[in-house]
Amino acid sequence: MIKVKARGNESLDQMLRRFKKMCEKEGLTKEIKRTSYYEKPSERRRRRMRKSQKRDFRPGGPVPAGRR
């Protein structure tokens, strides 16, 4: 649970901004967006495969087999 306590002369806008930053850091907004609608198991697998491929082909990562 994320809690934001008011500091000295902090306005409501500043508190809200800090709360949003904390949510982003924790990945809460991504999780909410992802679970806000039904995702078919095949779509979930496809998304995870794309994510792993992105991770494998990023600069500075391991060299793919066919590109030496």
Image (cartoon, rainbow, N blue to C red):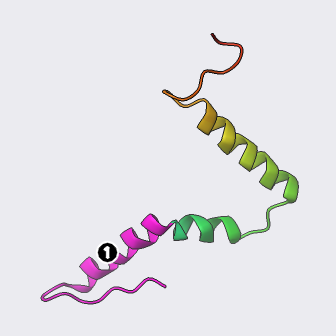
- Image side of residue 34 versus residue 6, left or right: right
Q: What residue is shown at x 50% (from left), y 27% (from top)?
A: 59
Q: Position of residue 13 (x, y in %)?
A: 27, 79
Q: Is residue 58 above or below residue 52?
A: above
Q: Residue at x 61, y 68 (%)?
A: 31
| 16 or 67: nearer the viewer | 67
Residue 37 percent location from the top left of the image: 74, 69
Image coords of residue 68 (percent x, y): 63, 10
Looking at the image, the residue that sits furthest to the left is: 9
Callout 1 amino acid: Arg
- Numbered disc 1: secondary structure: helix
Query: Looking at the image, which residue is at 53% across and 71% down?
Result: 28
Mark 1 burial class by Cα count in 10 Å: few <14, some 14-19, many 20+: some
Tally the marks: 1
Q: Nearer the viewer, residue 65 or 46?
A: 65
Q: Is residue 52 above or below residue 32?
A: above
Q: Is residue 26 left or right of residue 45?
A: left
> Please, is residue 20 above or below residue 48 in the view?
below
* On screen, residue 14 above or below 5: above
Residue 4 lies in the magenta-colored region = yes
The image position of residue 17, as x and y in percent, is 32, 73
The residue that appears at 37% across and 68% down in the rendered structure is 21
| The image quarter in which residue 52 lies | top right
Q: Which residues are magenta?
A: 1-26
Identify residue for label 1: 18
Residue 33 vs residue 38: left or right? left
Q: Is residue 8 magenta?
A: yes
